Image (spheres, grey):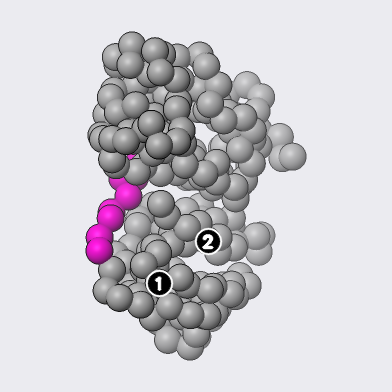
Amino acid sequence: MIPITQLGRFLLGAGALAALLASGCRTGPQDDGAASVRLINAVPDAGGLDVSVDGKRVWKRAEFRTSTGFKNITAGTYPVQIDADGPGTTLLTKSFVFDKKQSYTLLALGQAGRGGAPARVQVLPDQKAALPPGKAALRLINASPGTPAVDLVVNTIVGLKSVGYGRRSKPVLLASGHYSVQLAVPNTAQMLGESVSLDLAPGQSYTLIAMGRTRNQSLSLEVYPDK
């Protein structure tokens, strides 16, 4: 584990806790109309992240490059706290509402140490859309500190262009099947990191996240199926 020098708590405002505390973070068919939430840790030097709601831990030690997977919660406004290993400081305080039948990704990005893009959390509602028959969708998020923009090369063709740091691209639609994807420096033939093999299922959307750093050659492309 890389020791943390600066990170700590991310607090998403105060809100109504009664519904959540009464039912807990329920999963299963009884959750019709619930919101679905996951955390992805893209902070390379933060160690594991803990997620708590009103002091009750929901996820523990979500490591760099990992996703917690989706958990259903009763829709409403809630305080959510994200803690990193070791001492740190508050990243952000914000009030947030989880809507019914909506999926959300809490993306921790940036870096904990001084001298770079400060660590923060983006709350990203999943952008659901009906896909044409036999098609899959790919979106790219650039969460690599110090990497201003990246292209996504699908097989040998640039599928997404110049996705800036902290940005989420529009989806690119592809026929279901096997692909090789890799990051590249925009407007050059310079490839970044290793290529990743994808088997795309029809009707499924995927989030691809560029994380790690180019300067120490830890940049990688991670793939997370959406709900």
Q: Where is residue 195 in the image (x, y as percent from the top left)?
A: 60, 75
Identify the amino acid type marked 1. Answer: Pro
Above or below, comparing residue 96 to residue 158 in the picture: above
| Whether label 1 touches label 2, CB < 8 Å | no
Residue drawn at point x = 45 percent, y = 14 percent:
54
- What residue range appears in magenta? 120-130
Residue drawn at point x = 29 percent, y = 64 percent:
170
- In the depicted view, which residue is nearer to us: 146 or 164? 164
Quadrant of the rendered image containing residue 84: top right
Q: Is residue 100 magenta?
A: no
Q: Mark 2 points at which residue?
A: 223
Identify the amino acid type marked 2. Answer: Val
Q: Where is residue 129 in the image (x, y as percent from the top left)?
A: 25, 60
- In the depicted view, which residue is nearer to us: 71 or 156? 71
Count of labels in the image: 2
Q: Mark 1 points at which residue?
A: 202
